[in-house]
Amino acid sequence: LAFAEQPEQLQRLRAHPELLDTAVEEVLRWTSPQLHFRRTATVPTTIGDVQVAAGDRVVTWYMAANFDPTAFADPMSFDLGRSPNRHVTFGGGGPHLCLGQWMASLEVRAFLQATMNEVQEAQWKLGVEATQDGIDCNAGNKAECRIGRVVETRPMTVTAASEADLRILKESLTSTILPAFVKRCGDRCGEIYNRIIAPITGVRYEAR
């Protein structure tokens, strides 16, 4: 959707593929898939100028943080060359940092690489059609999803990944995701890797 609304950014990425690293981070900031999270204060504290008592429930809005004008220059601009980009899409650090961040970043990177190589132009069209309420999705040469009475139609072509692409993905998962998982929480994360990622890579983590 962002590339459809600002097609010059897709052209920019195609012309300057060296922006891929910063583009990944900007897409993660811009989309903010994790909207909010709630915590319960265990001790009295102050956040800004707001007093928080023990037992109060506090909501952290990740989307608001990712568009904070005190943290980002021109935050409402989708800028694939943005640097630095200290977004909090995966959390702000500490024990609740998302363990899947490396996998998610790798997926975004693979998507952007495919997009800049295969997609000439992104278009977004919305139409209204007298359909029954509910969701009706059909896959084919174009993806069409009816949600309520709104129809979203997007031309789509899906091709199978090449053997070379699959080899690169497997090598990346093994060399990047596995060490990061194990470094984070040892054998416990190794077990998670074995359940989710090992079936893709064919490489299992062996507990030490």
Image: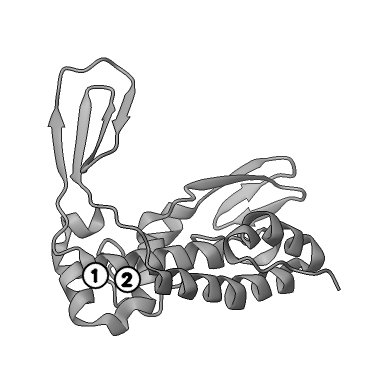
Give the left or right position of residue 166, taking residue 192 as reference: left
Please state if 150 lies on the left or on the right of 18 as rendered: left
Q: Residue furthest top?
A: 132
> Residue drawn at (18%, 55%), measured in percent from left and top?
4
Tell me, for residue 201, which label it has, or none: none
Could you tell whether 127 is left or right of 39 in the image?
A: left
Please provide percent x and percent y for residue 147.
29, 27
Comparing 140 with 60, the one in front is 140
Report which residue position mark 2 lands on.
113
| Front position in the image: 183 or 143 | 143
Mark 1 surroundings within 10 Å by alpha-carbon count, few (fewer than 14), some (14 through 19), many (20 or more): some
Quarter of the figure that contains the C terminus: bottom right
* Closer-to-camera residue (137/81): 137
Image quadrant in which you'd find residue 140: top left
Residue 90 visible within the image: yes
Q: Secondary structure at mark 1?
A: helix
Residue at 33% over, 20% down:
134
What is the x, y in percent for residue 60?
54, 50
Residue found 17% across the figure and 55% down from its top: 5
Q: How many marks?
A: 2
The residue to which callout 1 is attached is: 116
Measuring from the top left, give residue 87's x and y in whole percent. Answer: 46, 66
Image coordinates of residue 137 in percent, x first then y, are: 31, 31
Rendered position, 181 above or below 133: below
Evaluate if marks 2 and 1 touch, with contact meaning CB atoms under 8 Å apart.
Answer: yes
Q: Is residue 170 above or below residue 29?
A: below
Residue at position x 60%, y 78% from top? 175
Task: Give the quarter of the image for residue 66.
Answer: bottom left
